Amino acid sequence: MKKILYLISFTALVLSSSCKKIEGPGGTSAIRGQVVGSTSEAGESEITQVICTAGIELEHGDYWLLNTSNPTKLYYVYYNNPTWISVSDPQLQGRIGIMVSFNYSDSNIEIAEKTRQALLAVPGANYNITLSSDILTITDLGQVNVPDADNGTTNFAVDVVNNGKPGSVSSNTPIANERVYIIYGQNTFAAKDVRTNEAGAFSFEGLQKGEYTIYVLSKDPVNNGVMTRESIQASITEDNSIVEVETMNIIY
Amino acid sequence: MRHLLLVLLLALHFPGQSQMQTWLGVSCSFKPIKTTEISIGLQQRYFGFTAYNKSLLSAELAVKVIKGIKPFIGFRMGLSPNSNSDLNQKKWGFSQRYIAGLDFSFVDWFDEKSRLNIGYTIQNQWNTTSFKRNSSVLRNKLGIKYDIKNFPLTPFVNAEHYYNWKRDITYTIDEVLISGGTTAFRYFIGFDIELPKAQIIQISLGKKNLFLNNNDYWIGSIKYKLQIN
């Protein structure tokens, strides 16, 4: 009888060691968390190119219009030939006049240079100017939508090469329907994934005690098109428990 | 007898193979002392008739404390193909069951030699299975068996109720709620064929109705029992 009881006890002991629970399904605990995201889209400046004509094509009193991101600084650039005695300033209301003196003999490059000098002389102007041959490139310092420049009464070619627009930034926005992955124990690859709800929350349920890695994919802020892993470690130490992990922040 | 066998064999073929399990078992029981019985059994289970499901090795110790009442304890080990081998790189999955219960034979209280046996078994089992939730199940079984005089067959019928103490798990906002509930009913009808030298072949047909899903299945069981007295 004793031998039989020993045998049964031994068998039970040996067999009980074969059913060890490891990280993974089959438990009663859960890991929960939230995914929030940030996005940043840079604003753009209005860039206008003005191709100037030669002085012979200008009339005394001709002007063109330049708008900026500051609504109190709207300009008109008018051309004054000193040999004429009449007033060249068109005196447009609500705008600041910038006078450019010229001669009929000025080449288009000289007209462009004189225009540049006049624009640079404006105090507190919120634009940058570069000149290449007879092409003036005017870059607004603001990043908003700016009304397009106009060639007015001149024959200048005025072209908006880049429309200004404001940047957009959002942060800590709950990310809905984002896929979240779980790795059991020391495994390399994820065994399961769930999606976040409308509040960015996720829950892995029915887990055993043990160590887990939770991760979510995020856009690489430096390398366009590359995804990186935002991961977090979680440890379940008790049955029937809910482990809350830190909020995971991604760039989307 | 031939008619009864024919009916049972036909019944075994009645359910579709997809909802059918075949159990083949052997067991040996002996009494080291008069009031104590030890049983050791091995069972192979198949989906349908040939698709391997699992193997079960069991041991049970029952002690007759008073007339008609037998407390018992048992252990069962299961071996089956591991459906989560990607997680632990093991081909086989294990399960273990520990059992403790009471077996009542009501007729024995009045007449220990009666051919009629009305039995009631209450047992609780604790199951541990790889990659499955541990469970604790209370089973209540009521059965009737009658040993027909001068006839080699002993027909029986029984019904069993399964109550899982951890059937429902609800993950609320901040806690895990666990509650119990009925998980299954199981019924068996069959007979023992009495062979010489305390050998018995038990043939039975059963059905297990699972309470929360539609995976009910039929069971065709053949078991060889050897009793060493």
Image (tube, rainbow, N blue to C red):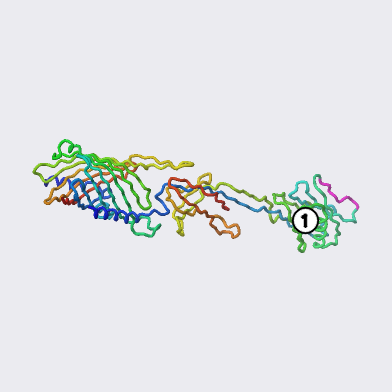
Which residue is located at x 39 percent, y 58 percent? Answer: B88
Please state the horizontal and vertical placement of residue A85, each as a whole percent of the image.
91, 52
Relative to B54, is B146 above or below?
Answer: above
Q: In the rendered view, would you say A114 is above or below A246? A: below
Say which quarter of the image contains residue B91.
Answer: bottom left
Residue at far bottom of view: A133
Name the subunit of mark 1: A
Residue extending farthest top: B110
In-image side of B164 versus B189 (left or right): right
Q: Which residue in the structure is indicated by mark 1?
A: A155
Left or right? Give the position of B74 relative to A190. left
Question: Would residue A62 be visible to someone looking at this image?
Answer: no
Number of numbered discs visible in the structure rendering: 1
- Asked whether A174 falls inside the magenta stretch, the response is no
Splitting the image into 4 quarters, where does residue B210 fall?
top left
Residue A87 on the magenta span: yes
Q: Position of residue A8 (x, y in %)?
A: 27, 53
Residue range corresponding to the magenta coloring:
A85-92
Task: Measuring from the top left, give residue B105's x and y in whole percent.
Answer: 20, 39
Q: What's the amino acid at mark 1?
A: Asn
- Taking A192 as reference, is B117 above or below it? above
Q: Is residue A252 left or right of residue B163?
A: right
- Secondary element under disc 1, as helix, strand or loop, is loop
Q: Is residue A104 visible?
A: yes
